[in-house]
Image: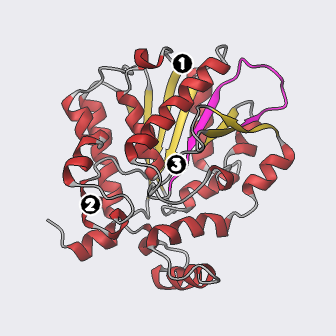
Amino acid sequence: MMSKEELEKQYSPSMWVVRLGAEEAQKTYSEMGNEGTGDLSMAALDGLWRVAVIPNATKKARATRRSLLNISYGDGEGDKLDVYFPEAGSEALPFLVFVHGGYWQSGSKDASAFMVNPLTAQGVAVVIVAYDIAPKGTLDQMTDQVTRSIAFIQRQYPRNRGIYLCGHSAGAHLAAMTLLVNWTEHGVKPNLKGLFLVSGIYDLEPIVHTSQNAPLLLTVEDARRISPQRLLEAAPAQLAGPACHVLVIVGQHDSPEFRRQSREFYKTLGRGGWKASFEELQDVDHFEIIWKLTQKEFVLNQIILKTIFQEC
């Protein structure tokens, strides 16, 4: 058992930043946030890191790619998504659906279009999904929103060449939860061919004992009920089926706990008969692993493209 202090450190990604170092990162982004916002939680610092490092990623994507913005995938105020298309006008495209991170309490689709230009340039449509973050949304609601967004894409683009779901950090948790969805309840079976789970959390119980839980208000029972690690251990490979390729990806400089959780989830998938792969990407931390997706040569972009066009 870890102490509360050690858990706090392990599950605070800003403490593991390698380019600036933890102290300098916190100082830099706290100063940025204190311009009218007051003291920031570590989760807010994590969100600021993404926005600060790549402030123009979404702006550039919207300026240079054909897109449909703020499309409603449901009746809720937060049920919105953006779709970015390659130059070719066909609907028979592979779709990469991205779910942002931010500890379920920060982040936005409007600052998450990292991979749009590199992927659309290679013929992949990219969907960026919004969901209601805490405290407005609960994790059950967020999971439902991500599920409904996938069903919406399938209905809107039934000729797709495969839907590939990518989630980062908390978004990887929400993406992983779709492995347990009973799609018959949604009236559609999506052409879900692959998942890219990047620097994710799959067992939520440790989060209960950290400051990240303040807006989430999770009990231990809640955490166990919505942890894909525990759910797949109990009912492996029953719903989405082992044909769906799941890639579990983590950064070399993610915290030891993030790396442990990724390895354990990969092993659980393997024991359940899933088609699973594990990648530890070198020389990147929890933030670099996702914001480097703006670079077409970045290894994660190459993994995504190779997987999509092999599966297609």
Q: Residues within 10 Å of mark 1 (few under 14, many from 20)?
A: many
What's the amino acid at mark 3? Answer: Asp
Q: Is residue 78 a member of the stretch shown in magenta? A: no
Query: In front: 285, or 168?
Result: 168
Percent of width and height locating residue 8: 31, 71
Query: Residues at badges 3 and 1 in contact (C-beta under 8 Å)?
Result: no
Note whether 178 is above or below 156 in the view shown.
below
Examine the image and state in which quarter residue 116 appears: top right
The answer to whether residue 168 is left or right of residue 224 is: right
Q: CA distance from mark 2 to mark 3?
A: 20 Å
Point out the frontmost of discs 2 and 3.
3
- Element under label 3? loop
Note whether 167 is above or below 14 in the view shown.
above
The residue pinned by badge 2 equals 208
Examine the image and state in which quarter residue 92 appears: top right
The residue pinned by badge 1 equals 191
The answer to whether residue 240 is left or right of residue 38 is: left
Query: Residues at badges 1 and 2 in contact (C-beta under 8 Å)?
Result: no
For the point 63% across and 80% down, the residue is: 32
- Element under label 1? loop
The residue pinned by badge 3 equals 132
Look at the image and tell me whether residue 248 can be seen.
no
Q: Which residues are magenta?
A: 83-101
